[in-house]
Image (tube, coloured by chain):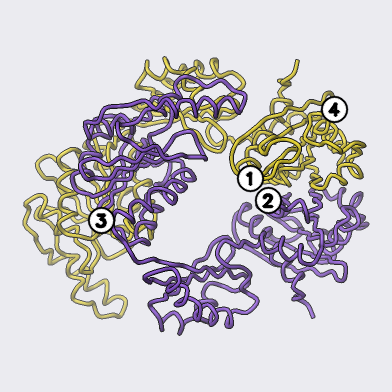
Chain colours: A yellow, B purple
Amino acid sequence: MIVEVIAVGTELLLGQIVNTNASHIGAALAERGLDANFGQVVGDNHDRLTRSIELAIGRSDAVIITGGIGPTQDDLTREAVCAATGLEMEFSESYANHLREWWESRGRVMPESNLRQAQHPAGSELLMNPKGTAPGLAIKHNGTLIYCVPGVPAEMEYLLERDVLPRLSAAAGKSSVLVSRLLRTWGQSESGVAETLDDVYRGSTNPSLAFLASGGEIKVRITAKADNQAAADALIAPMESEVRERLGDSVFGVDDETIERVLLRLLTERGYTIATAESMTGGLVAAALTSLPGSSKVVRGGLVAYNSELKQTLLGIDDVSTVVTTETAEAMAEGGRRLLGADVVVSVTGSAGPDPMEKPPGTMVIGVATPDHTQAKELRMVGDRERIRTYAATNALHFTRLALIGKWWKP
Amino acid sequence: MIVEVIAVGTELLLGQIVNTNASHIGAALAERGLDANFGQVVGDNHDRLTRSIELAIGRSDAVIITGGIGPTQDDLTREAVCAATGLEMEFSESYANHLREWWESRGRVMPESNLRQAQHPAGSELLMNPKGTAPGLAIKHNGTLIYCVPGVPAEMEYLLERDVLPRLSAAAGKSSVLVSRLLRTWGQSESGVAETLDDVYRGSTNPSLAFLASGGEIKVRITAKADNQAAADALIAPMESEVRERLGDSVFGVDDETIERVLLRLLTERGYTIATAESMTGGLVAAALTSLPGSSKVVRGGLVAYNSELKQTLLGIDDVSTVVTTETAEAMAEGGRRLLGADVVVSVTGSAGPDPMEKPPGTMVIGVATPDHTQAKELRMVGDRERIRTYAATNALHFTRLALIGKWWKP
């Protein structure tokens, strides 16, 4: 069952509103194992809307049209469905009465234009919409299912859940589900991860693999389609094992498990507190560590030693003639442990740019000190100042994880 | 000039991400007077993507394809453009060298699959993308303009502004210019600003007024359309004077002048250094102050005293039995001046939630200490933890500005 969503509204094309209806419907279809190949957006124009509906009818088994069924002159979905299908327009006297009662019950006189909402392509089933005045429409035309729902998200969502999705699932004759598992990795490039998994990617369509890059992470998504959740999980499990075995410690979290969440868990498990000693990131690492509820149980705090004098006076580093070095990063982390009384301290020093400072902009040194061990690592990143600082902060969190799981990067 | 946007990615159809690229591009086109009749979304599938491109070429003057130009196997936009246009695929040896250098400069070995990004339909102009490794593509085919840009929003936006929009405007023969002036305000509600300026808003269409709320600021945008920049500026000037007179000190910056930039300027003018003493914001204020190039000249650093013990040992606050108070915020700011040796210190304490801490979540107290004076202010905000922390950090910067321009909030 291939379903296509048409979102109607000039305001969508103008970028005045974001098309969240399409993503909402897309996620709901995927959850139920219904496929979508295409999505369309079209303005409030009779001819173009008609062409969009014709196109969708020609290539999909079902069409959900959201928007354009209100009472005003630019609500043209009903007319366009008639034009695309050749169906006549009919008028529902009983729905007209419902509309009149709706207005009367609010002590108001109904503008006559509202009767447009009692019009519908011949043979439509009217879907009651208690959140608004426009009824949804369900139409079967030459084997294609057409559903018209309002563009107002709350009204659309109500009719989608209550009427459209159950009918689509029934018509699809199966209650299959689509289940995804996201493996979050760090430390390898997107193309590197893709190469490592190339034969897995090519060798299977269900479950399927996809690669997503965002925020310095590469995410590997495994998606399975099956009759039910348990069957989908069973399809995912062996591929997940294979991916994990190939990617090893690069995989740091699953689904919505961010690096911050992983760190809080690791620290809690080990009974450690943490603090930061930052220079180039200026507080970003501390802000990340304190972003989650419950962080106060393990986060002591942090020092931003932006001016090198503070590295001397507060972190006890004698020589600050050069500061973008592994020696300084290690001394900052150890000095931070003393000053802030934390078990683990992560430090960052470097040159954020645009002007070079000792080393080229984008040079960053990350240090981690634990009760047992201290190490630092120099990295480089190209980009603007914001990107460099964000990358440094993300790396600081990931190197802290490596230290906590005992995978120090130097022998 | 009719422009059509095709957003490529199965994750869009699955509703895993919202199609903000389409709305961003739509708004940018509308601002420049370029029309859009249709929008498309299509998954990572060669044949369907090819059909989408054919459809767009057949009905629009220009096509912007966002997504599908990365290095992995499911990035298929280049191939689909060739299939839809009949153009041969070519390989850019110079771009391949650029890619190799990009990887080498990071001390890493390039996976061979990255060379896909040096492929392009014959006759393409490669658009340099400093924010990523995939170049944008500009193609002219039988009179239709085709632009391929990445799906990553920051990369897409960069190429859109720098390459795509200027070319489209030129091709459309637009001779008039649209010039905007943004007055950034803080401290009044959006409806308050709108009421203050209601008659100005109603009284003029060119220049026109618009109100935008984002990041805790209310921005007033004055937009003029004229034959050239000078004529547009002349239209804007008198309205800007009027708006400034009415809004007074609420206007803190113009155009891209962020509060961070304003603070660095004020501090530099006064010869002051600054530091932070943060609790609930966990480093966000320090990170904001150090976000700009040149901040090292005035920013000393900061202490994140997340655990109250650090407020005692490092900031010298004797009684930490209650910490969400104006007394504590003032003592943190003054203690920060001593510890960090800065002229000005801004402090934040409060309850970020979701669990209450002394006071309801969303309670925040901001303190500012200068060489002459110390004051604090308690505020409240509703929202989730992230929103509350961000709002607290923004307010901390704005109260610092008030202190620096001598507008202390208490008599």
Residues marked 3 and 2, same chain: yes
Secondary structure under tag 4 reads loop
In the drawing, does residue A193 fall left or right of residue A209?
Answer: right
Q: Chain of mark 2?
A: B
Please tell me which residue is depicted at 60% across the width and 54% down the height of the picture. Answer: B384
Q: Which image quadrant is residue A305 in?
A: top right
Mark 3 and mark 2 lie on one chain; the one further toward the N terminus is 3
Q: Could you tell me which quadrant the C terminus of chain B lies in? A: bottom right
The numbered dot on residue B1 is: 3
Distance of mark 1 from mark 4, alpha carbons? Answer: 33 Å
Q: Could you tell me which quadrant the N terminus of chain B lies in? A: bottom left
Residue type, mark 2 in image: Pro
Asked if marks 3 and 4 touch (Cβ < 8 Å), the reply is no
Distance of mark 2 from mark 1, alpha carbons? Answer: 8 Å
Residue B250 rendering spot, x and y as whole percentages: 63, 74
Distance of mark 3 from mark 4, alpha carbons? Answer: 66 Å
Secondary structure under tag 1 reads helix
Circle 4 residues within 10 Å: few <14, some 14–19, many ≥20: few
Residues marked 4 and 2, same chain: no
Q: Mark 2 — residue?
A: B293
Secondary structure under tag 2 reads loop
Residues marked 1 and 3, same chain: no
Q: Mark 1 — residue?
A: A385
Please tell me which residue is depicted at 9% across the width and 61% down the height of the picture. Answer: A90
Which of the two discs, 4 and 2, sits closer to the camera? 2
- Does residue B157 appear anywhere in the picture? yes
